[in-house]
Amino acid sequence: MKSTFKLTGLADYITLTNAMFGTMSIFFLILAVDDTLSDPYSEGLATKYIWASMLCIFLSAVGDIIDGPVARRYSKQKLLGGSLDIMSDCLSFCVAPALMMFIMFGRWGEATPLWTVSLGVAGFWIIATGMLRLARFQHDEGSNLPYFHGLSSPGNAMVLMSAAGFVWLQPLLGVGPNLKNAEICLGEGIDYACHATPGLDIVILPIMFISGALMISDRRLSKLKGGLDMKLSIIQMICLLTGITWALIRTGASDVSLELGGDIAPAGWLFFSSGLFAIYYIVKPQPPEVVHDEEA
């Protein structure tokens, strides 16, 4: 045990804290299903746990931003830091967001099994591309490039949370499909049941596949170390954190997804704003490519 702790530094404990938040996020998602009635996908998920899960992922992302500078300033040598960071990021920004999307939007499963299978494939895509992204980041570490190749795994988690929050609350915003006006009814006799369709859920699949593809793409995205991009990134994180916090505060302990009130609606626009900032970061002109002189 002593030999293990001798290999760790302050940044490593921050990384372990990030992993703790990622684990808590998964636990909250399990509670979101387990704490409901006998049929959570038709009667609604315990939504307060969904927001708590998002908050944990967000806090893990903040810790991921901090641990790098701390490691560079206070860690004289990198021993366990790189490996710990990769494993923590995989848990917090790949597994947790993929499970979040599946649990939040897999409630169509009883009516359309194909949707549940497709959502499961999309979840695996997020995990697989996230792992490849993290492996490539570790391979490229030390190149000192002013940009990332592909969307970072924390950035991907921000995109997914923004999209999930907006789509989840969209029926309360007065824009687009109304959750209560669309139903799918299946079965016969005593097994006959109607399940509300979640409006814009259909956009979740392409968002998941596109965000996963962006993580392993060659698109150059700035590292947000200053300037306008940094300021917009801070605004985006404030919008996302405020949206999550507002939703968490305004959701009752016993509220389920099909019973949410209009007082939670403003959080939907905050999630939407966060998503717009994320889209700008992705589609804005790429920074110039840095070509290394091989002879040097």
Image: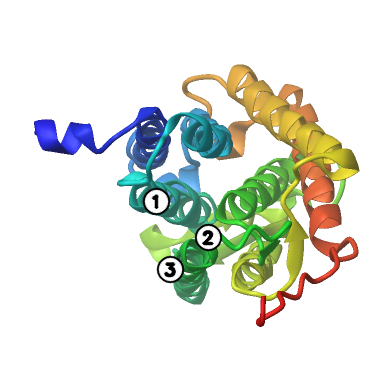
**Left or right relative to 98: residue 275:** right
Residue at the spot 74% in from the left edge and 29% down from the top edge? 238
Number of the front mark, 2 or 3: 2
Crowdedness near tag 3: few (<14), some (14–19) or many (≥20) residues, C-alpha within 10 Å:
few
Number of the front mark, 1 or 3: 1
Q: CA distance from mark 2 to mark 1?
A: 10 Å
**Left or right relative to 285: residue 187:** left
Q: Secondary structure at mark 2?
A: loop
Q: CA distance from mark 2 to mark 3?
A: 59 Å
Residue at the spot 35% in from the left edge and 41% down from the top edge? 30
Q: Check the image and tell me how it is coloured.
A: rainbow
Closer to the chain start, of discs 2 and 1, is 1
* Quadrant position of the C terminus in the picture: bottom right
Residue 230 appears in which quarter of the rendering?
top right
Closer to the chain start, of discs 2 and 3, is 2
Closer to the chain start, of discs 1 and 3, is 1
> Which sits in the foreground, 235 or 178?
235
The amino acid sitting under disc 3 is Glu
Q: Which mark is residue 82?
A: 1
> Which sits in the foreground, 169 or 94?
94
Residue at the spot 45% in from the left edge and 61% down from the top edge? 192
Residue for badge 3: 188
Vertical relation: 171 (above or below) 282 = above
Q: Secondary structure at mark 1?
A: helix
CB under 8 Å between discs 2 and 1: yes
Residue closest to the far left = 1
